[in-house]
Every structure is written in structure tokens, then in C-alpha cells.
């Protein structure tokens, strides 16, 4: 039922929202939080591009992924730019993410940066909004909303 409602938004959907991850592997275990924006084209084969900024005590990560999903699950992969605030170094890497659900869900993220593997489990919330493909009515006007 959720996937049917998702398709009623139209051809293009944007989502934005926070993410919280528990990171293990590499050095000490720690939490990180992110804000992520994604563009979905769901007309035929659902595909997406996303981008995010993730913050932890010692690092800032900028990332982007290409994604696809069916039903309430999906997968994504893409590059990561990590800024280590303590060492004042920048590293490149990649990550892949597997998720469950659309707007409130769980995910598992594998990340490899500077020969170090990170495993992250997390949760997220996304707010969807459509940009194209929605029905428009020429009989009503919304520019004079205070009548």
C-alpha cells in the first residue's frame, strides 16, 4: 500500500531528512548524524541520486550515491569525501547502503575510506515532496489564497 501511495506523487519525488548512524569498525565505535537530500524518478525503473553531509566528533563526510529500490527496500553506492578535523586531512572513499522502508526506516552502510572499513547501522526519517507529474487544475487559482 505504501508503494502505491508513493507512485501517486507523480514522476519525480524529492526527499529530505535526518539520519542517525552507529559506526563500528576502524577505530572506536561512535555515533554520527547526517542530513540527506534525494531525487527519485519513479515512472518506470525507480532510480535516485542523493547527497548528504554527515557529522561526527572527528569527521565530516560529504557523499553522493546512485540508488534503486523496489517495494520497501533498496541499495545505493557512491563516493565519499572525508574531512578528518583532528588530523586535518582529507580522504576519498566509497560507500554502499542497503535500506528498508521509504520515509521512516533502517539502513546498513558499508564504507571504505583510506584502507579502513566502516560498518554503520542507522535509522532515518524523510519528508517527500513531488515536483512533476502532479495533476494541475486550470479551473482554480491559488495565487489569491486569502479570499
Image (tube, rainbow, N blue to C red):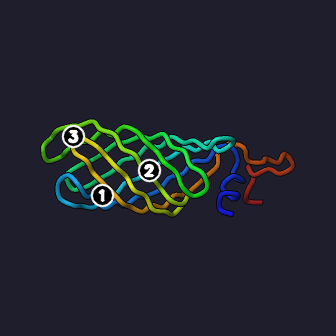
Provide the residue designation for mark 2. 36
**Element at badge 2?**
strand
Residue located 50% across and 52% down the image: 16
Q: Nearer the viewer, residue 59 or 73?
A: 73
Q: Residues within 10 Å of mark 1 (few under 14, many from 20)?
A: some
- Report how far apart the C-alphas of labels 2 and 3 lie in the structure: 25 Å
Residue 96 position by quadrant? top left
* 123 on left or right of 80: right
Q: Residues within 10 Å of mark 3 (few under 14, many from 20)?
A: few
Q: Earlier in the sequence, mark 3 or mark 1?
A: 1
On-image quarter of the N terminus: bottom right
- Report how far apart the C-alphas of labels 3 and 1 lie in the structure: 20 Å
Q: Earlier in the sequence, mark 2 or mark 3?
A: 2
- Report how far apart the C-alphas of labels 1 and 2 lie in the structure: 13 Å
Total label count? 3
Percent position of residue 50, x then y: 47, 43
Amino acid at each position: 500500500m505504501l508503494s502505491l501511495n508513493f507512485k501517486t506523487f507523480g514522476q519525480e519525488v524529492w526527499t529530505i531528512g535526518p539520519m542517525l548512524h552507529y559506526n563500528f569498525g576502524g577505530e572506536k565505535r561512535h555515533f554520527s548524524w547526517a542530513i540527506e537530500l534525494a531525487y527519485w524518478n519513479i515512472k518506470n525503473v525507480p532510480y535516485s541520486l542523493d547527497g548528504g553531509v554527515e557529522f561526527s566528533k572527528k569527521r565530516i563526510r560529504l557523499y553522493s550515491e546512485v540508488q534503486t529500490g523496489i517495494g520497501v527496500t533498496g541499495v545505493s553506492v557512491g563516493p565519499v569525501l572525508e574531512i578528518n578535523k583532528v588530523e586535518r586531512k582529507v580522504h576519498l572513499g566509497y560507500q554502499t547502503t542497503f535500506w528498508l522502508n521509504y520515509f521512516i526506516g533502517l539502513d546498513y552502510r558499508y564504507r571504505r575510506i583510506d584502507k579502513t572499513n566502516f560498518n554503520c547501522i542507522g535509522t532515518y526519517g524523510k519528508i517527500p515532496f513531488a515536483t512533476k507529474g502532479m495533476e494541475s487544475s486550470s479551473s482554480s487559482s491559488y495565487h489569491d489564497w486569502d479570499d
